Amino acid sequence: MKEAISARRVRELLGPLPAGPAHAGLSDTLTLLIGDGRIPLDVRLPSERILADALGLSRTTVTRAYATLRDSGYAHAAQGSGTFTAVPGGHERAHDRVLVPGGAGEDWIDLSCAADSAPAEVMAAYTAALSELPAYLGRHGYFPSGLPVLQEAIAARYTARGLPTEPEQIVITPGSLTAAGVVVRALARQRGHALAESPTYPNAAEMLRAAGLQLHEAPVDGHGWDTAGILDTVRQVRPDFAYLIPDFQNPTGAVMTAAQRQQLGQALRAHGTHVIVDETHHALALDGQAMPPPFAASNPDALTLGSMSKTHWGGLRVGWIRAPRPLLDALLRARMSLDLGVPVVEQLAAAHLLRQGPVSPGQLARLRTQRDALIDLVTTLLPDWRFTPPAGGLMLWCELPHRGATALAAAVAASRVVLTPGPVFSVNGGLDSYVRPPWTRPVAELRAAVERIAAAWRRLEESGPLSTVRPRRAGAVF
């Protein structure tokens, strides 16, 4: 069954229409709402009569606006079923590259990957791991669920956060993406449905799609989650899975409030949805702020993922699942159908690091300096770009004055900068008025990169923007 958006919800998202002909203002604003993911794709728009009544416009005005949407590729009509949202070119996303095989080249500045270089503690952890390795060499070396010493360290971290956890509830995997894949492999049914934030971590969306799941959007931006819209989708679709990043969400940097966690956690549990909670960025609170309770505190059935890649080093391929006990057998069977365990040295190094804390103070200080520098550079050199300054994580989610992120990424590549445009993070297309620059490079590289991006943006501006209409946010998001 196709999803639908109500006329009331469309009215809230539209806000006041821009000056000029009403049909043009309506079609322009709907185009941006669809393109930026605020109105999800493949949902049925209200009928022309119902939307006209809700907006206080004539039916002719809405009819002309819908016709413009169809002509521009942002909607299509299904005979007898209504008008449905779309994006030009369907679901294929231009510039769909997050990691470049072999890297971008030494003379390039690569802003496509939000991951930091390894701090000194990582080398020390590997040295300690090698000294501990002889104690394991007399055994077979297979630990499908993980080394007990690492399971204990991870369980202790959750317990310290107010989420009592036994070591047996931890399943070690080679990274959080593999952890999510294990969950889906264990619990998915044929032709199932999954709720995914939009924008979201693109590799996770591709993993869900590759598992045969139909994806439905849960809109989020730098201000937070569209809780009302998400709950509408949950009621209509009853998804099998929900993939959420509640802590410094990738790419928006938003943090889900305790009230939102409670509301969404209870609703998803009531509908029998398996909630996959990606906490990869949780420890990266750069301003020392207290974080909300873990999502699993509001939904005991949630499966929580963690990883060493963002807090320590991407080359340390260690992730994990914190699972409710009733699901452990299914998860371990799925885990062993993929491989027989993470290398022992990697697990020993991870355990050594986690016993010191979730992330080193020195690394947090460096990331804080780089974040502040990137914010200053974008504010100064690209003053018409908008963003919500994140309190942690690894990236900015910048809104451009108009569509053109994909064109900008292509243009700045000529200046040897790799920049990821918004459509890469979209579940079903759109978001071409956003880019995601991370602050994971040294300040000097960030300065050079933003200078080149600003120059490329000026050249694009001189060629003429598509549109300067910005839809108003629909009030507070809970």
Image (cartoon, helix red, strand yellow):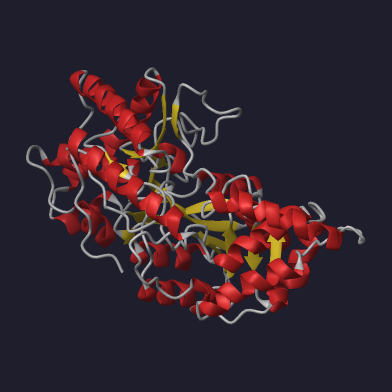
The correct choice, above or below, for 161 with respect to 352 in the image is below
Residue furthest left as drawn: 19
Q: In this orientation, which residue lies closer to the viewer: 365 or 387?
A: 365
**Residue 181 visible, this angle:** no
Q: In this orientation, which residue lies closer to the viewer: 360 or 230?
A: 360
The correct choice, above or below, for 407 with respect to 82 in the image is above
Q: At x 70% / y 75%, what residue is drawn?
A: 167
Expressed as whole percent of the image width and height from the top left, the position of residue 224 reads 33, 60
**Image check: 85 left or right of 136?**
left
**Residue 241 visible, this angle:** yes
Q: At x 38% / y 29%, what residue is drawn?
A: 406
Expressed as whole percent of the image width and height from the top left, the position of residue 189 reads 69, 59
For residue 422, which quarter of the picture? top left
For residue 108, which quarter of the picture? top left
The correct choice, above or below, for 24 with respect to 83 in the image is above
Number of callouts in the render?
Answer: 0
Q: At x 40% / y 70%, what residue is drawn?
A: 291
Expressed as whole percent of the image width and height from the top left, the position of residue 348 reads 71, 60
Q: In this orientation, which residue lies closer to the viewer: 222 or 158?
A: 158
Image quadrant where one finds the C terminus: bottom left
**Image check: 442 left or right of 471?**
right
Expressed as whole percent of the image width and height from the top left, the position of residue 361 reads 44, 60
Q: At x 55% / y 63%, what residue is drawn?
A: 239
**Image check: 122 left or right of 378?**
right
For residue 288, which quarter of the picture? bottom left
